[in-house]
Image (cartoon, rainbow, N blue to C red):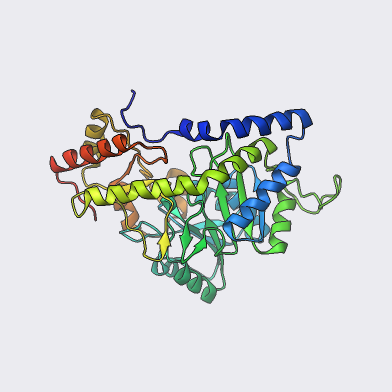
Amino acid sequence: MSYEVPFTDLGAMTREVRTTVSEAWADLLDSSRFIGGEVCDQFEQSWAAYCGASYAVGVGNGTDALQLTLSALGIGVGDEVVVPTNTFVASAEAVVLAGATPRFADVSPRALLLTPETLEAAITRRTKAVVVVHLYGQMPDMDALCRVAERAGIAVIEDAAQAHGATWRGRRAGSLGRAGCFSFYPGKNLGAFGDAGAVVTSDAWLAERIRCLRDHGRVSGSHHRHAMVGTNSRLDALQAAVLTAKLAKLDAWTEARRAIAFRYREAFGSGPVRLLEEAPEARGVYHLAVARVSDRERVQKQLGSMGVQTGIHYPTPCHRLDPYRGFTTQPLPVAEQAAREVLSLPMFPHMTNEQLARVCEAVDEVADAGESYVA
């Protein structure tokens, strides 16, 4: 089905960087240096600086970024890691792949993010870390969360896969915890032309451990000495070239997303459909524009019939997914209720004024016809 307003438009972003990427790819084809090298080094340095961290380590994808960080910190069998249950499954998957146990926490009702209270309730004597997820491109109260973690003696790992450039009190996502983990999946705000990811940190020891683990446990500067059991999760130079080209556009694209979110908030006002809240101390990057709607199935179906494509992020909390039910210790009612109500509206930096007006009109019309609400 073709939509008058698609959920996203990756092609528009590609067109903006196509010439730059084509030139960079031509240089790489001539050099045949497809993994590592100057192109990857350049992107790592630029991404670390952008995030306000000392180091960035490019890896194969965002899931590997999380798993490698946990493994580098020595977190594994017998250890627990707190994860908000309202997240993409990779946040919990990486914990299990590292050999540790996810301990799921509930979220705030108005932002659907981890809170200091839900974190504290999930911590046990076996807890070694918390994965703080900046879901939808929004950051939770990092000051309070870091205080809880410090009191408990646990590491804070930021899952910033949806939050490229988001800030909390002026500090960018990835720079507030022990490490920040990013995905550059094509649909992300900063997306590659395939899978890619990175870890940022200001801890030189941790950065070196992750570099070693991503490359079969090799000792830096050596091809045949292996200090640890590692894996193969290196960043392709082709993807690094794409990311470097797109990074130059990221701030402009982010401001366009924020302007769209502002228009949504203005248009919906205090009506029955509103976006999730953003904390005053935070500046989100609106990877997704998520609202809560009581009769979601009807609203989504009617919006689709009116040419507006929507999404659901996410229909099942992690602790209710079959592979993770065994890790569940208690009900998590906020996330369970929200999973039945969240609806993601079209959000991409190249939305036209006409497309934006169409979404606002359609949402108002559909909401007026039912009993939709925001919790």
Q: Position of residue 240 (x, y in %)?
A: 65, 41
Residue drawn at (65%, 56%), measured in percent from left and top? 71
| Coordinates of residue 200 in the picture (x, y in percent) | 62, 56
Name the spot of residue 280 as percent of width and height, x first.
36, 65
Identify which residue, 295 or 51, lies in the foreground: 51
Instruction: Residue at 70%, 28% (x, y): give it.
Output: 26
**Horizontal and vertical percent for residue 108?**
34, 61
Q: For this rendering, which residue is in front, 227 or 37?
A: 37
The mark total stands at: 0
The relative height of residue 18 versus residue 117 in the rendered view (above or below) is above
For the view shown, which residue lies furthest in the bottom direction?
151
Q: Is residue 218 visible?
A: yes
* Residue at the outermost top position: 1
* Residue 88 in sight from this viewpoint: no
Q: Quadrant of the C terminus?
A: bottom left
Task: Say which of 33 and 115 sits in front.
Answer: 33
